[in-house]
Image (cartoon, rainbow, N blue to C red):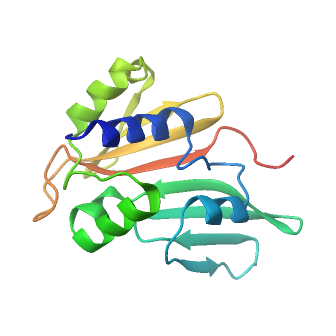
Amino acid sequence: MSGTAAATFLVGLVTTGRLCGVGPGSSLAEAGAAVRGPFVDDVDASGRCLRRDHGFAEFSFNAEGAEWVMSAMTLQLHRLAGNPGLARRFRDAVGVAFPPAVVWPDLRASLSAQSAAECLAVVDQGGFIEHRYRGPDAHASVLVNDEDHPPALRRGDVWSVDVWAARSTKA
């Protein structure tokens, strides 16, 4: 992975469960203030779950009383790899430029430098290898291609990073 800022950003996302200061437990308003730019909101039929899709990232919220509280988020690195315009939107919204592809061995080395790689559990997901990190406040999953997805991604490139609450977001 080229770029110290990208490496630092991803290590922080995996180990803290926070993207631009928001993560599981954050409100919809906090997420909107932290990650700017166009998005699509999709509320499920029950009216209890909301998914906000920025293209480069998706945030999931659960209704808790009159508030929406974030339960999970996904950074869609595969979408950035194949779409330079979306990669620019990500850079503008978040302030970090990513290389065209994030290579798992490089991210793992960055996690190792923070003593986080020792905490990873590996699960075969059929076409992907999942590396799970369990932190005290959030859990993360790094999905890595186990096969080529031309033209943008190859075997060993990171597909996405998922983060979810380590415990219920309800107060």
- The image shows residue 116 at horizontal and vertical percentages of 43, 22
Question: In this rendering, is residue 28 above or below 18?
Answer: below
127 left or right, relative to 135: left
Which residue is at 49% across, 73% downward? 37
User: Can see residue 83?
Assistant: no
Report which quarter residue 1 is drawn in: top left
Q: Is residue 75 left or right of residue 102?
A: right
x and y percentages locating residue 67 in the rendered image: 82, 65
Numbered label tally = 0
Residue 36 shows up from this direction: yes
Q: Where is residue 160 in the image (x, y as percent from the top left)?
A: 36, 52
- Tell me if residue 103 comes above or below residue 115 in the rendering: below
Identify whether 77 is placed above or below 46.
above
Relative placement, left or right, of 21 versus 14 is right
Query: Horizontal placement of 28 versus 101: left or right?
Result: right
Residue 121 picture location, percent across and down: 42, 28
Q: Residue furthest left?
A: 151
Residue 155 or residue 105, whichever sits in front? 105
Residue at 66% across / 54% down in the picture?
Answer: 71
Question: Could you tell me which residue is drawn at 37 percent across and 69 percent down?
Answer: 89
Q: Which residue is drawn at 28% across and 60% down?
A: 78
